[in-house]
Image (tube, rainbow, N blue to C red):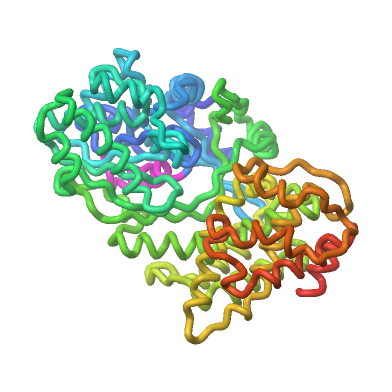
Amino acid sequence: MKLNIKEIEQTKQWEQEGINLPKFNIEDITIKTKKAPAWIHFGAGNIFRAFPAAVQQNLLNQGLEDKGIIVAEGYDYEIIDSVFDAHDNLTLLVTLKSDGTIEKTVIASIVEALKVDSENKKDFTRLKEIFTNPSLQMVSFTITEKGYSLNYPNGEFYPDVMSDFSEGPKAPKSYIGKLAALCYERYAAGKYPVALVSMDNCSHNGTKLFEAVRAFAKNWEENNLVEAGFLSYIEDPNTVSFPWSMIDKITPRPDESVKDMLKAAGFEDTEGTVTSKNTYVAPFVNAEKAEYLVIEDKFPNGRPHLDKGGIIFTDRETVDKVEKMKVCTCLNPLHTALAIYGCLLSYTKISEEMKDTELRRLVEIIGYEEGLPVVVNPGIIDPKNFINEVLNVRVPNPFMPDTPQRIATDTSQKLSIRFGETIKAYVKSEDLNVKDLKLIPLVLAGWCRYLLGVDDSGEAFELSPDPMLETVRSYLEGISLGQEGPFGEVLKPILSNDKIFGINLYNAGLGERVENYFAELVRGPGAVRATLKKYL
């Protein structure tokens, strides 16, 4: 079995292997979509193929929608060639269930794939046609948080952005410059309304997208590179909206064990590609079953019926609460705790950590006992049920090939939101005492211990990338296993840094506790395990 339109028309073999096929006429849906597109998505990666595209597929199967999605890729054009063009825009979605079984579905809701390249005359002309069609309701994005950035950390604009600022919308080079140019086409064609919906996993994503697009509109209008009024069009939520959203679904790189299962079922298109931009793609996508997408319901030109497919539409305040629930309490802090101690205890799969008595108890206490008392409850999702699913279904899933080493990436950038918000909530609370926090400080001490780059058996390991590594490790120079404290003077520059933790840990009354934990963790080989046993 090969993944293309002609092959899936031979339904018998696919069905014998338990592969779900689309229940709609792909040709009819393609014609309707191209004539009057309603939804175009930027970012042709795994999460889009495994989640929004799959939701639309279910709606098409049920007859609740009659149009598919157009996908556009503006960063890694090779994805279009190797995945979409090579396989008639089809994807095989492999859902990895926690009971060890898999579900296989051919996703055919994507009907057209384009490169967001102003030098590609054919594709960029087609993009202009889509953006100038009054039927377009939603432009969505999974381009990562970096995709919305226009400048270096020092504030200097990227060269492509500077070029687009000076040259205007005629032949843009930067990602957001190209998007802004397409929005200008829509403005010039009739000031048609549209929603630009970031589905990226970053805080207040709609605002990040708005500020990036607005920067181009403002610059171009001030320099007379576009008609006066374009900036007002972008700034008016009744014409162009930028809803906030919260997305949650794990879609790891194509996994070898999944590839082997597909081969055994007779599916031939299993070979993946690593593009020149280091993107891992394959004709199939493997993903967990659990998924959440909550979107601010602000669509000036209407929207697809995604609410009938399990996507939640609500107000901005509730979206913000859902994000805080996940990031500050119910998922991300637990992942980070497992990442830090998983590296120290030489684990290579997060799921295996959940079989470890101490590590399971560590995240249970952080989630249920230390986090839930101050959780932001969004009302539409129960926080305790969310943690139950995370700890009993999602993280222990043996099929999810996620590693503590990957999750440990950029930890210094995550601690303030994942733990600092909880600490600050305890400090402000009249009913809770911050001194009651025992295991969150143990995780922070564990991170300091992790920075030594030596596991619990005394063997060196490679630290995951982190922009603060050089700075924080410099304070720990000379510390080795078996060394006696006190370590206050060494740790103070780290633990007092409110940029790392969101709060000065000494001012919060936790600095000395973290120091003491650290002293226990470095007593020698086996000290990490001994310390966990002592406090758990």
Q: Residue furthest front?
A: 489
Q: Is residue 56 left or right of residue 500?
A: left
Most foreground residue, 35 or 72:
72
Most foreground residue, 378 or 150:
150
Q: Is residue 110 left or right of residue 352?
A: left
Q: Is residue 434 among what the camera can see?
A: yes
Q: Residue at x 37, y 28 (%)?
A: 175
How many dots with numbers?
Answer: 0
Q: What x and y, as percent, mark residue 33?
A: 26, 32
Q: Is residue 108 among what the camera can see?
A: no
Q: Is residue 375 left or right of residue 195?
A: right
Q: What x and y, as percent, mark residue 397?
A: 65, 55
Q: Is residue 95 left or right of residue 320?
A: right
Image: 393 above or below 256:
below
Q: Residue furthest bottom?
A: 431
Q: Quadrant of residue 259?
A: top right
Image: 265 above or below 2:
below
Is residue 178 highlighted in magenta?
Answer: no
Q: Residue at x 33, y 20 (%)?
A: 163
Most foreground residue, 380 or 409:
409
Q: What x and y, as percent, mark residue 519?
A: 80, 65
Residue range corresponding to the magenta coloring: 51-67
Q: What x and y, as percent, mark residue 95?
A: 55, 46
Q: Quadrant of the N terminus?
A: top right
Image: 26 above or below 408:
above
Q: Quadrant of residue 235?
A: top left
Q: Quadrant of the C terminus?
A: bottom right
